[in-house]
Image: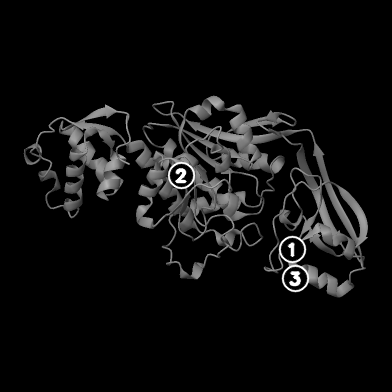
C-alpha cells in the first residue's frame, strides 16, 4: 500500500480550542484496553457517556446475530515473556499491543525456537509493534518489534529457555455497544458509526470516537434538527452485525449514514461510496459528501466489499445508504495497525477539520429541499423585492446573484438544492441562502420530497 508522505502536506494552522478539546478526548481514549468485548470496551463507552448521552446495550454470549453468534467475553490481567534471569522482553503492562487479542491462557517454558510461531513482528518496520487479533479461533501469541526479537536471538540463541505467561479468561459474558440518539422533526435517521475495539491506536479508533462525540455535541446545541441522528459506538464487524440483527426497524428508517474512521492524521479526505450509489446512481449521502468537501479535493472511491463496518450496512440484504469517511484510509499509512499509530500521529487541527467537514455534510442533508417557483413565466423582478439591494456592495455579489438565478430556474418541482449546487458549481451554503431569500420574498414554495431524480 502507498505510504502517506506527510512532509509534503501544507502546514497546518495553529489549533483552536475545539481542536485542542478533541485532542484531549483522544488522549483520554487512547490508553484504554479496548477489545470486541470486556471492560476496556465498557470503559470506552462510559467515557463517551461523560461527553454525550450514551445508552449502553449488553448482548449475552451465545446470542445468535444474523449468521454469527455473540462470542465469549475476554479478560486479561497479565502477560509476558521472560528470559531465564527474569528479564521481561515482552510485557502487557507496557502496551496492550504486545498480546494477540483474545489469546487463551498459557503458562510454559520453551525455547525461542519453539516460541517463534507465536511471535509476531514487522520485519519491514523493525521498530514497530504490530496489532494482531484471534477473536474467533482459540490461539495465543505475542507481538514485539523485530529489533527486540533480533536482539533476544543474538544474546541467547534459538535454544535459550524462556518463560511464557498469559493470564486471560474466556467466559460467558456480553458484547457491549453504545448509542446516542438525537430526535429530530422527522423519524428519518442519519447514522454515524465508529468502531470501538482497537487498543492503543490513536488514529484508527480513538480519533473517530472523539470526532463523533464532538459532532453529537454540536448537533445537540442546534435549535432544530430535521433528521433524527443516531451515533453508534460498537466493536468492529460483530458490533455492527449485532446492531443490525437487533434493530431492523431502525435500519428501515435510515436515510443517510457514514462510517467514520482515521480522522486525526494529516492526510486529505477519502470517501468510499455506498454500494447502491456505486452500482446504480449516487445516493444523496454520496453526493452530499462530494459537494461538501469539493473544495478540499476529497478523493471519492467506489464501494468495494472490504473495509470497515460499511460492508455490513451495505450487505445486499440491507443495502443501506451508508458510506465511509476517513482521512488516510486503512492500510495506506505506514503506522496503520502498529504501535506507530500513537498520539503523535493525530493533530488537533486534523481533528477539528474532520468535525467541520462532517458539519458541512450535515448542513447539506439538513438544508436540501425541492421547491417550485411562484412566478415561473419570465424572470421575476428581483430588484423591486429588495433582493438586489440586499446584495449591493457585497464582495460576494456575483456568487449570491448567480445562486438566486440558479435557484429560481431549477425551481420546477423536480430539482433539489443539492442539484442546484452541483449544476451551478456554487457552494451549497450560497444556494441555501438564496432559497431562503426567495422563500421570504414569496417567489418559492416548498414542493415536498423529490419524486424523480432529474438532477442526475
> Are discs 2 and 3 less than 8 Å apart at CB?
no
Of labels 2 and 3, earlier in sequence is 3
| Residue 26, above or below 229 | below
Single out the mark in the foreground, 1 or 2: 2
Q: Quick one: label 3, few (<14), some, or many (20+) residues within 10 Å?
A: some
Q: Quick one: label 1, few (<14), some, or many (20+) residues within 10 Å?
A: many
Q: Is residue 271 left or right of residue 169?
A: left
Point out residue 442 in the picture as x, y percentages from the top left corner.
15, 30
Q: Which residue is mark 3?
A: 147
Q: Secondary structure at mark 1?
A: loop
Q: Which residue is mark 1?
A: 121
Point out residue 29 in the picture as x, y percentages from the top left corner.
61, 49
Compare residues 433 and 255 and report the one nearer the observer: 255
Q: CA distance from mark 1 to mark 2?
A: 37 Å
Q: Secondary structure at mark 3?
A: helix
Please report the residue visible at 37 percent of the width from the left and 38 percent of the height from the top. 365
Marking on residue 278: 2
Q: CA distance from mark 1 to mark 3?
A: 9 Å
Point out residue 41 in the picture as x, y percentages from the top left corner.
67, 41
Point out residue 5 in the picture as x, y percentages from the top left corner.
51, 68
Q: Is residue 39 left or right of residue 25?
A: right
Amino acid at each position: 500500500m502507498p505510504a502517506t508522505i506527510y512532509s509534503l502536506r501544507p502546514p497546518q494552522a495553529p489549533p483552536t480550542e475545539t481542536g485542542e478539546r478533541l485532542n484531549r478526548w483522544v488522549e483520554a481514549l487512547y490508553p484504554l484496553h479496548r477489545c470486541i468485548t470486556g471492560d476496556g470496551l465498557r470503559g470506552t463507552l462510559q467515557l463517551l457517556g461523560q461527553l454525550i448521552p450514551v445508552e449502553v446495550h449488553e448482548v449475552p454470549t451465545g446470542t445468535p446475530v444474523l449468521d454469527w453468534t455473540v462470542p465469549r467475553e475476554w479478560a486479561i490481567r497479565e502477560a509476558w515473556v521472560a528470559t531465564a534471569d527474569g528479564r521481561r522482553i515482552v510485557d502487557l503492562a507496557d502496551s496492550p499491543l504486545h498480546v494477540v487479542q483474545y489469546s487463551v491462557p498459557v503458562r510454559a517454558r520453551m525455547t525461542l525456537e519453539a516460541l517463534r510461531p507465536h511471535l509476531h513482528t514487522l520485519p519491514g518496520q523493525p521498530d514497530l509493534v504490530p496489532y494482531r487479533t484471534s477473536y474467533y479461533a482459540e490461539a495465543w501469541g505475542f507481538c514485539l518489534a523485530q529489533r527486540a526479537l533480533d536482539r533476544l536471538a543474538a544474546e541467547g540463541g534459538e535454544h535459550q529457555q524462556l518463560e511464557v505467561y498469559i493470564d486471560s479468561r474466556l467466559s460467558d459474558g456480553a458484547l457491549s455497544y453504545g448509542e446516542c440518539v438525537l430526535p429530530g422533526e422527522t423519524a428519518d435517521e442519519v447514522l454515524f458509526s465508529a468502531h470501538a475495539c482497537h487498543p492503543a491506536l490513536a488514529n484508527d479508533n480513538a480519533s473517530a470516537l472523539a470526532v463523533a462525540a464532538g459532532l453529537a455535541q454540536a448537533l445537540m446545541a442546534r435549535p432544530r434538527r430535521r433528521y433524527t441522528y443516531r451515533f453508534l459506538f460498537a466493536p468492529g464487524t460483530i458490533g455492527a452485525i449485532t446492531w443490525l440483527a437487533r434493530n431492523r426497524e431502525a435500519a428501515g428508517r435510515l436515510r443517510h449514514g457514514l462510517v467514520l474512521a482515521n480522522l486525526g492524521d494529516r492526510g486529505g479526505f477519502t470517501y468510499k461510496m455506498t454500494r447502491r450509489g456505486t452500482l446504480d446512481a449516487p445516493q444523496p449521502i454520496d453526493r452530499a459528501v462530494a459537494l461538501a468537501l469539493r473544495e478540499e479535493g476529497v478523493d471519492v472511491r467506489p464501494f468495494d466489499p472490504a473495509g470497515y463496518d460499511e460492508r455490513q450496512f451495505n450487505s445486499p440484504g440491507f443495502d443501506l445508504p451508508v458510506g465511509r469517511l476517513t482521512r488516510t484510509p486503512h492500510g495506506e499509512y505506514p503506522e496503520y495497525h502498529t504501535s506507530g499509530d500513537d498520539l503523535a500521529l493525530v493533530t488537533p487541527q486534523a481533528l477539528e477539520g474532520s468535525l467541520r467537514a462532517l458539519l458541512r455534510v450535515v448542513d447539506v442533508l439538513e438544508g436540501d429541499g425541492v421547491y417550485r417557483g411562484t412566478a415561473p413565466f419570465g424572470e421575476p423582478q428581483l430588484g423591486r423585492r429588495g433582493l438586489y439591494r440586499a446584495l449591493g456592495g457585497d464582495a460576494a455579489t456575483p456568487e449570491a446573484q448567480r445562486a438566486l438565478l440558479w435557484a429560481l430556474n431549477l425551481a420546477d418541482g423536480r430539482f433539489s438544492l443539492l442539484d442546484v449546487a452541483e449544476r451551478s458549481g456554487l457552494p451549497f451554503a450560497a444556494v441555501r441562502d438564496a432559497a431562503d431569500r426567495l422563500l421570504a420574498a414569496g417567489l418559492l414554495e416548498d414542493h415536498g420530497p423529490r419524486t424523480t431524480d432529474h438532477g442526475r
